[in-house]
Amino acid sequence: MKSNSNWVARSRAHVWHPCTQMQHHETMPMVPISHGRGAWLVDADGNRYLDGISSWWVNLFGHANPRINAALKDQLDKLEHVMLAGFTHEPVISLSEKLAEKTRQQLGHCFFASDGASAIEIALKMSFHSWSNQGLPEKREFVCLKGSYHGETLGALSVTDVALFRDAYGPLINTCHVVMSPDFRQAADGETADQVVLRAIADVEQLFMQRSNQIAAIVVEPLIQCATGFAMYAPHYLTLLRELCDKYRVHLVADEIAVGCGRTGTFFACEQAQIWPDLLCLSKGISGGYLPLSLVMTTDSVYRSFYHADLRRGFLHSHSYTGNPLACRAALATLAIFDEDHVLDNNRATAEKITATLSPLREHAGVAHFRQRGMIWAFDAVDPRPGFSSRFFTAALKQELLLRPIGNTVYVMPPYILNDEEIGFLGERILAVFNQVMQHE
Ligand SMILES: *Cc1c(COP(=O)(O)O)cnc(C)c1O
């Protein structure tokens, strides 16, 4: 107990925690984690927690994964880092080749950074600069979906429509066009999910008709707007959006930072709509949840628009740790697990079991819009008191579960490695926590 409270006090004194009002930690203690193994995190007092949200959506194959650990140990003794301008190395080459192969060379060029927000910055800069290199410098506006989240640096915030993150910095942020989200929950009486998609597409087309000469790109999270409370929509939207982008010459940027890496059932979420974007951002799961790594993949056409004798027509963007060899090795080990363990196939079976274990919630009177795609489940608590999210989080910890609802939306986004016992545990405990939190309403 001593070590535990000691950590919390030291952390509060000197660590400024992310996405947190630090004063709230006067009453709500943070959880000091000493180690992790598989799907479990263990705190300084030895309490364990099933990591139901993959440590902010990054972990795919468990904590302290033996295969990723071995790859990193091997890489440590070879090369920890070298600058990527003017130099190259085996891990970054192999990773770029393997990812390009996964898009059947449609997105054959990989540009690296370290976090998701930087990947979004790169996509926005690359889109604008590409049009400008093609003699269309007036194409410099961006479009995002209502409620979208694409990260919290100033550029990424400019295409983020979450008031809580955005409002404090309003004067610093460029405006962008916000179009209707295709979220199926907006269906009016008698309206189908597909009709919601058509309404959302009509909204985009109306904007493109008026302003496509000024618009560089539209940024979307394919299939699921995660940080918005897991708004899900039909793949058809992406197919139609691809057509509009071609027709009006607007880049389609797919932010697959959360939904990529098999999370929605295919390696890239876009595959379910049988389309490729012009720019695709990956991060979070790509390093297996081990090291900061992000990248933007793009087409020959965008790449060629920068290819020139003139330095200023090049894409002069860099970060110190661009293409870090350790992070790339972690990513290669992660991709190797996908192949060796037939992860996408096995996840289908795992997902069926998880859906079954959560079925009492689907039927629950206090639950609306129970939804699932791939390895993501979400449902909305009906009319809970304010503070539902933090009360649920606290009650879940007591039940050995790490779950962190967004507003009234509870979601489950576990590592891909849960065994039958852990799946049963997850189902039982979520139901217990939900009943407990809703009973006290
Ligand atoms: C997490 C996230 C980001 C931002 O990534 P960071 O690494 O946190 O900067 C951007 N887009 C989506 C969809 C995300 O989920």
Image (cartoon, helix red, strand yellow):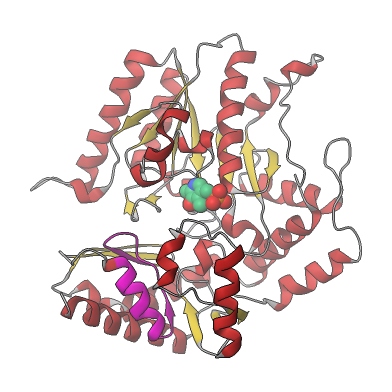
Q: Is residue 404 magenta?
A: yes
Quadrant, the C terminus: bottom left
Residue 256's x, y, as percent?
51, 48
Among the 4 quarters of the image, the one containing residue 34: bottom right
User: Looking at the image, which is closer to me, 391 or 135?
Assistant: 391
Say if residue 350 shows up in the picture: yes
The residue at 83%/71% (across/down) is 73
Give above or below for 186 relative to 249: below
In the picture, the quarter occupied by the N terminus is bottom right
- Residue most extreme to the right: 78
Lateral position of residue 215 relative to residue 437, left or right: right
Q: In this picture, is 361 found above or below 139? A: below
Q: Is residue 369 magenta?
A: no
Image quadrant in which you'd find residue 182 = top left
Using the image, determine if residue 16 lies above or below residue 184: below
Residue at horizontal 70%, vertical 21%?
306
Residue 60 visible within the image: no
**Percent x, y for residue 62?**
59, 75
Residue at image point 41% right, 45% down = 165
Q: Position of residue 364 (x, y in %)?
A: 17, 75
**Magenta-tinted stretch:** 389-411
Total tally of numbered discs in the picture = 0
